[in-house]
Image: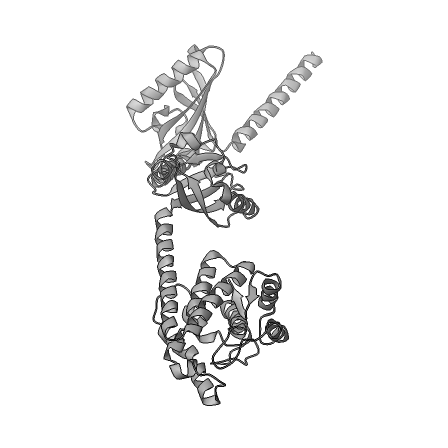
Amino acid sequence: MIKHIIEQKQASNRLEELESLESSILAAILHAVIGLHERRIVFANNAVESVFGWKPEELIGKTTRILYRSEAEYETIGKYFYSALDRQQTYIEEFPCRHKDGRDIVCLMSASRIGEKLEEKKIVVIYENITERKKAEEKLRESEKRFRALIENSSDIIQVVDSEGVIRYTSPSIQRVMGYKPEELIGRLSIDVVHRDDLPLVTNGFEEALQKPGVPLITVCRCKHKDGTWRVIEGIGINYLDNPAINGFIPNMHDITDRKRAEEKLERSFVELAETVSRAMKFRDPYTAGHQRRVAELARLVGEKMGLDKDRLMGLYIGGLLHDIGKCSTPESILSKPGKLIDEEWALVHVHAKQGYEILDGASFPWPVADMALHHHERLDGSGYPDGISGDELSLENRILGVCDVVESMISFRPYRPARSIEEVLEEIKDGKGTKYDPAVVDIMLQIIEGGEFEIEKGRLKM
């Protein structure tokens, strides 16, 4: 008898523990949990208020119709539930619901039957309010639609390239620009269509981009069109490989072939104009005309050895061709005068720098040609003319032209003085290295002269 009482007491305590545990679990669940019997609510946890706005006691005894937007939806959902639960233990689906305040919400519903038989019509339903998530997903879908529309209708080529350089996506514009259908390039290396001479530039740039996430990389290279012709492509790429949402290197590329041709044509026009003007000076002063051409070629060679880019070299060459254009205003009697010039005559010669600047300043050259005409006689220590500027005030172009001008002038004959020997030329630039002349420019000039790239022949540089 005592044993039976003890067992009953233990069972009662165990039941209380289980009920307490069940109550704690239900209280900890953030989603609404509702128990149903014949579609009437027999239990609701506290979370129903945060999901639906109803207090648990307000729902007990009511049908779940109160949780849905219409009678038709209520019946439809019931058919889904009971049909599914007749075949399986658990049913999960998204359904539109109604909040107590009248707002429409979306819930992810998970329903399981209680007991072995559906005929008992006992089920438990968990409602998770996913309204904000659905709104966010919809916004994301709309954003993706807009983004895809922008990408697919862009005139530029937009690609996604993985860390190995393999194309994972390319926009449809690839066919209009390069002749390839997207599927013909996806899965191939992005460098497959790059001109072999441009491969080092492209591969080195890609390696650099891999080390600098988020930093734009600009590259211009030749790419092979499907028809076999070469197109000049400019690309701006950014490494998003560290971004899980993108996980790729994204280049935005456009065809600049026509623009490059136009630029090259314009560049040729500038060169032809400068060479024409330089040749025209021959009829007035043959010494200056030949001097300008030789200084221009020598300056371009120095610039190449200093690593200047193509555009800057072109500006340096044109600046060299026109640096003494101001001498067209110098009296011919001085330019061709035999014998030594007096101070007043030298003063008139020195004016050519400012005269050259005034002639070139109004021209729309894309390079500082007018400044080169004005300051090519300036020196690092401020001993030059016409403004006596020094140090960092002197551009690299003027530092190069300054040395080239001195070398070519000294080695060439002038009516007012004989040509100087190569020893005198070398002595002049060596003595002036670091004071009057830029040390780096002097070193390269010495390398050019002593290496025989410019041969000294009869007091002239042979080019």
Give x and y (percent) for residue 123.
Answer: 45, 19
User: In the rendered image of this protein, does residue 131 appear above or below residue 276?
Assistant: above
Image quadrant occupied by the N terminus: top right
Give the left or right position of residue 143, taking residue 221 as reference.
Answer: left
Residue drawn at x 63%, y 22% is 13
Residue 350 occupies which quadrant of the picture?
Answer: bottom left
Residue drawn at x 29%, y 24% is 71
Please identify the residue farthest to the right as the structure is shown.
3
User: In the rendered image of this protein, does residue 407 appear above or below residue 62?
Assistant: below
Give x and y (percent) for residue 424.
Answer: 61, 75
Q: Which of 3/334 is in front?
A: 334
Tag count: 0
Q: Which of 46/30 is in front?
A: 30
Residue 353 occupies which quadrant of the picture?
Answer: bottom left
Give x and y (percent) for residue 399.
Answer: 53, 70
Say how the picture is coloured. Answer: one colour
Residue drawn at x 38%, y 54% is 264
Give x and y (percent) for residue 252.
Answer: 42, 44
User: In the rendered image of this protein, does residue 233 appear above or below residue 381?
Assistant: above
Is residue 86 visible in the rendered structure shown here?
Answer: yes
Residue 18 occupies which quadrant of the picture?
Answer: top right
Q: Which of 310/144 is in front?
A: 310
Is residue 368 visible in the rendered structure shown here?
Answer: no
User: In the rendered image of this protein, does residue 375 appear above or below residue 223?
Assistant: below
Q: Which of 268/237 is in front?
A: 268
